[in-house]
Amino acid sequence: MSFPGSKHSPLPPPPVPFKVGLLGGSFDPIHTGHLTIARQVQEHLQLSRVLFIPTGDPPHKRDGSLAPANVRLEMVRLAIADNPFFTVSDIEVQRKGKSYSIDTIRTLQHHYGPSTVLFFIIGLDAFLDFPTWREPKELLRICHFVVVPRPGQSFRALAGMSLLPPLAPDGLTGLDTGALNRLDIAIPSASEVTCLALPPCPTSASEIRRRVRNGLPLANMLPPLVESYILRHSLYQEDSNHTRI
């Protein structure tokens, strides 16, 4: 600290925390809805970057129900190539066996160091199931969760959710009606949970796969490079065999 008459220079301001958003998913395929959510969260929370994390062998998916991990990873790379705030990690693709979020977060914490704040971006439907995840209390302690809307889901469903403190109904209703665009939930001995009332994404990967399989137009549902990749490699032509690569 410097005082009047002191010969010492003022201390520099503390460094701004590096804020990394984490957006995981099967990305089978990645579509414009994923990119819109990532961009909106990055802008609302002023994130330094958003890290896309394609799943390798997710615990809740049937064996063989996804396109190969390397294919999904490549589609993400193509989709984010022109956005300097977006990057992709193969951390879960490279991991052998079942992949759990707690393992990924701990690895990323070690990689980025204590000056980085991790923001776990998650859809409301998945967050309602969050208490069944592996070590959910520890995840809340070490990671700031960002909950975004999903079609057909209501933020009012968070009332009474285990692991969260009691929530005022007015705030949750405000998120659902658009009267409130953000709600920050403080959790004792844990990081915050931030709910953002973004426009829900109507695009779904299952609908894209259905349209590709039936030769229907995709109506800007995919980034152009991803659409070209899918058509070039004949992806999603059959339910039981996603790719001929």
Image: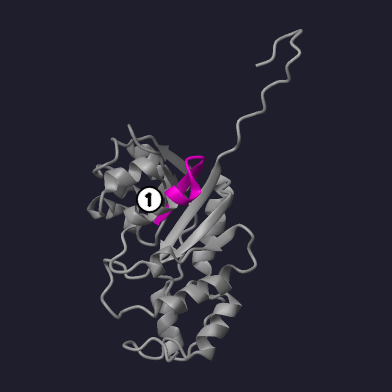
Q: Position of residue 237 (x, y in %)?
A: 41, 91
Can you give x and y, in whole percent of width and height, for residue 174 in the image? 42, 43
- In the image, is residue 118 part of the stretch drawn in magenta? yes
The reply, left or right, for residue 114 in relation to residue 129 is right
Q: As drawn, is 50 to the left or to the right of 235?
A: right
Residue 229 at least partly seen:
yes
- Of 1 and 25, nearer the camera is 1
Give the residue type that dot 1 points to: Arg
**Front-most of residues 195 and 191:** 191
User: Vertical placement of 212 versus 172: above or below?
Assistant: below
Kindly identify the residue that appears in the image at 33 percent across and 55 percent down. 103
Identify the residue at image location x=67%, y=23%.
11
Q: Quadrant of the N terminus?
A: top right
| Image quadrant assignment for residue 208 | bottom left
Q: Which residue position is annotated with label 1? A: 106
Specify the segment rendered in magenta.
110-122
The image quarter containing residue 211 is: bottom left
How busy is the neighbourhood of tag 1: few (under 14 within 10 Å), some, or many (20 plus)? few
How far across and how far down the image is residue 122, in percent? 40, 55
Q: How is the image coloured?
A: one colour
Residue 33: horizontal and vertical position, in percent? 50, 66
